[in-house]
Image: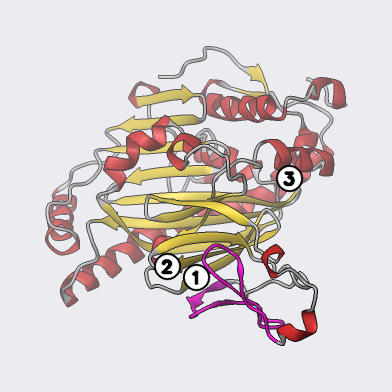
Amino acid sequence: MYHQDQARPAPLPAEAYFSDEFFELERRTVFARHWHCLGPVGELARVGGYLAREVMGIPIVVRNEDGRLCAFRNVCPHRQSVLVRDGSGHADKLRCQYHGWEFDGEGQLSHLPEGSSFRGFKARTACLDRLKVDTLFGLVFVNFDLDATSLPDGLGQLAVDLVPKLDRYSYHWMNSTEHDCNWKVPVENSIEGYHSAAVHAKTFGPLVDEKLIHHELGPRHAYYRSEGRYQVSPRSQVHDALVRTFLSAGATPEPQHIQAGIFPNYMIDFSYFTFLFTVIEPIAPRRTRFTWYGFLPGPTPTTRLGRLARDVYSRRFFGGGLKILAEDIAVWPYIQRGLEASQRRSVLGRSEERVYHFQKFIADQTAVDLDRKSGNQP
């Protein structure tokens, strides 16, 4: 059931979706102390393994240093070159690609080529900028603020409550794409089902009956659960038995569709035998990166038949998910164009209350009088 019984004006004006000023405000307030997801922790399993990528326009590198994870801005203090190129790999030392300066697990300069030419230079001042790093759900997260709260506290109680369920899954698949829209467009698209009948008529269908829907609105999340989505037909019973046999011993399908929006930019989805973790990253006011991390129940199968069953199932399920996602992606540029041309404030219906809750979170975090600054009319 829904919490609201009437429509309301949207908390955010249209300019919040394209204004350079508002984008910078979000960087300073919403994301400054946010835990940013970099990728699967499996990329760092070996000592010397590293994962390098850009977050909010800043290059980051995480490295396995003697069994512990260390995170730094991926920028050499010598001439400000990026140390290692984006991607994952293995290296004995964290070495700058430009002049070969090397750094230890604390970010301190450990080797200075032709050191005699740097007479008078204090090597201890040439250290990398450290970041806070932690793991959860089999993924690596970093925080630019060394004094930030712990990762579980940063993601909120709902994420903590879901950990026991997520621990039964293992990472299997990733899909990442970039799009010409503000990051809040796909976030809001992901946390409401009102568009399903129009956008997903051929793939997903209309909303579940409201009587079967449960919404929970928390300080940092919007939780959705629908009962009885899956029909237990003879064919599905056979399919379930095969999955339990070859995919993961003892696995049982989720009886509900569960979706948790962890503000500001994460989504957790449970559907059938699958768990999806979605990361929606701001790149620029009109540019967004959308990444899906797919998980399947249990550890990776050790038998050839088990691995085959896992691959077949993942292609079937994730392939279907990508078809639904493609329908959403096709609409995002048109939403962006409309927002930039709009002179009115959006209106949100009862079934869009999670969108209202998200926008209110952003408005509160930015703590700016948007009505005074915006020319949008209700």
Where's residue 293, x and y in %?
44, 57
Q: Earlier in the sequence, mark 2 or mark 3?
A: 2
Q: Would you name the residue on which mark 2 appears?
A: 44
2 and 1 marks in contact (CB < 8 Å): yes
Q: Amino acid at mark 3?
A: Gln
Residue type beneath disc 1: Tyr
Viewer-proximal residue, 110 or 24? 110
Q: Which residue shows up at 57% across the image and 67% down it?
A: 52
Q: Classify residue 20 as left or right of residue 317.
A: right
Disc 1 and disc 3 in contact, CB within 8 angstroms? no
- The disc at residue 50 is 1
Q: Amino acid at mark 2?
A: Leu
Label pair 2/3, CB-CB below 8 angstroms: no
* Residue position for label 3: 336
Image coords of residue 345 (percent x, y): 76, 25
Residue 46 among those drawn in magenta: no
The circle on residue 59 is none
Between disc 1 and disc 3, the foreground one is 1
